[in-house]
Amino acid sequence: MADTSSATTSGTEHLSPSECWWLLSKAEVGRLGVAALGTVEIFPVNFVVDQKRIIFRTSPGEKLLALTMRNTVAFEIDGWDDDSAWSVLVKGTAAALRTDPQIQAASHTGVKPWTPDPKNTYVQIEAREVTGRRFRRSHKAETIWYW
């Protein structure tokens, strides 16, 4: 597959893998989707991209347990500006890094937890599939908020 964007007749643009990785590298927060014990959970995480892998830190708990039970994950970021909006989806496998060389390499990525809680477990997502879309935002309709 060529590494170029393509647009549909509806105006939605399918992003190339290179564009997806570039957007991922510029983002700070994503959503990790995991499915374990018959439920689907979504966790916001701050992360970095390192050699086409997503690295984040976590602590023991529901997220790490879910990754241990079933390591197939989805990871999503999105963004927008005045003219367009975009979304990138990564499907792959996640694993807690266990060996000293793995942990040492991950520690040099600069990923730091946003919360003061200790998050000493590094996790990496190896991408199996990376897709993205961009579309032009309509300026014809005004958003009206009702409370």
Image (tube, rainbow, N blue to C red):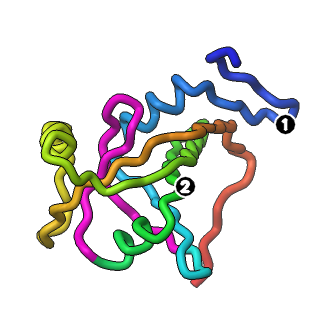
Q: Residue furthest bottom?
A: 147
N-terminal of the pair, mark 1 or mark 2, is 1
Q: Between 49 and 67, which is closer to the camera in this rendering?
A: 67
Q: Nearer the viewer, residue 80 or 36?
A: 36
Give percent across and percent down for residue 122: 24, 54
Residue 71 within the segment the image draws in magenta: no
Q: Quadrant of the C terminus?
A: bottom right
Q: Which residues lie in the magenta part?
A: 41-60
* Residue 119: % across, % down: 18, 65
**What's the mark number on residue 10?**
1
In this view, 6 is above or below 111: above
Residue that badge 2 annotates: 74
Residue at (59% x, 41% y) in the render: 86
Task: Tell me if 61 is positioned left or right of 139 in this view.
Answer: left
**Left or right: where 62 falls relative to 17:** left
Amino acid at dot 2: Ala
* Residue pictured at 14% horizontal, 72% vertical: 117
Please tell me how crowded label 2 is: few (under 14), some (14-19), or many (20+) other residues with Cα within 10 Å: many
Which quadrant of the figure has residue 58?
bottom left
> Does residue 9 sit above or below 72 in this rendering?
above
Residue 24, image quadrant: top left
Q: Secondary structure at mark 2?
A: strand
User: Disc 1 to disc 2, how far (Cα)?
Assistant: 26 Å
Question: Which amino acid, mark 1?
Answer: Ser
Q: Position of residue 85 (x, y in %)?
A: 59, 42
Residue 135 is situated, as x and y percent measured from the top left of the image, at 68, 38
> Circle 1 — which element?
loop
